[in-house]
Image (tube, rainbow, N blue to C red):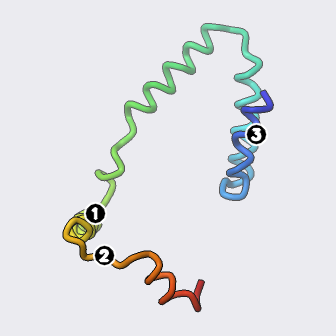
């Protein structure tokens, strides 16, 4: 159980605390479950949820997709700037 609880600690600053607390409560409940039928229902819910998730690409606007495509084309054609040069240029603001 400690490994499961430790897994969520890394995201503590990024997740709303009430949401985090709810997740921790559910995790503790699931870890203590002995009823295999409930576990099977949870597994089915998880699988259904995963299959219904929309591909992130489909959530982008046409302008966002075109921008990504242009960036990929630039990269393929070598129209890039090394990280070290960009870092040097923007060092005063980092």
Q: Which mark is residue 23?
A: none
Closest to the camera, between mark 1 and mark 2, is: 2
Crowding around mark 2 (Cα neighbors within 10 Å: few <14, some 14 to 19, many 20+) is few
Q: Is residue 38 left or right of residue 9?
A: left
Residue 10, image x, y percentages: 70, 50
Q: Quadrant of residue 37?
A: top right
| Near-viewer residue (94 or 1) | 94
Q: Which mark is residue 80?
A: 2
Residues at marks 1 and 3, CA–CA distance in whole angstroms = 37 Å
Is 25 located above or below residue 43 in the figure?
A: below
Q: Is residue 29 left or right of residue 41?
A: right
Reading the image, the residue beneath label 1 is 61
Is disc 1 placed on a helix, strand or loop?
A: loop
Residue beneath the point at 30% across and 52% down: 57
| Near-viewer residue (74 or 45) | 74
| Near-viewer residue (80 or 32) | 80
Q: Check whether the beta carbons of the residues at disc 3 and disc 2 lie within 8 A of each other.
A: no
């Amino acid at each position: 159980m400690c490994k499961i609880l430790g897994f969520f600690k890394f995201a503590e600053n990024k997740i709303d605390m009430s949401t985090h607390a709810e997740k921790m409560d559910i995790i503790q409940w699931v870890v203590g479950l002995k009823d295999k039928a409930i576990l099977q229902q949870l597994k089915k819910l998880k699988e259904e949820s995963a299959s219904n998730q929309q591909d992130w690409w489909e959530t982008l606007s046409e302008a966002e997709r075109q921008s990504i495509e242009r960036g990929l084309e630039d990269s393929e054609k070598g129209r890039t700037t090394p990280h070290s040069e960009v870092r040097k240029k923007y060092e005063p603001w980092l």
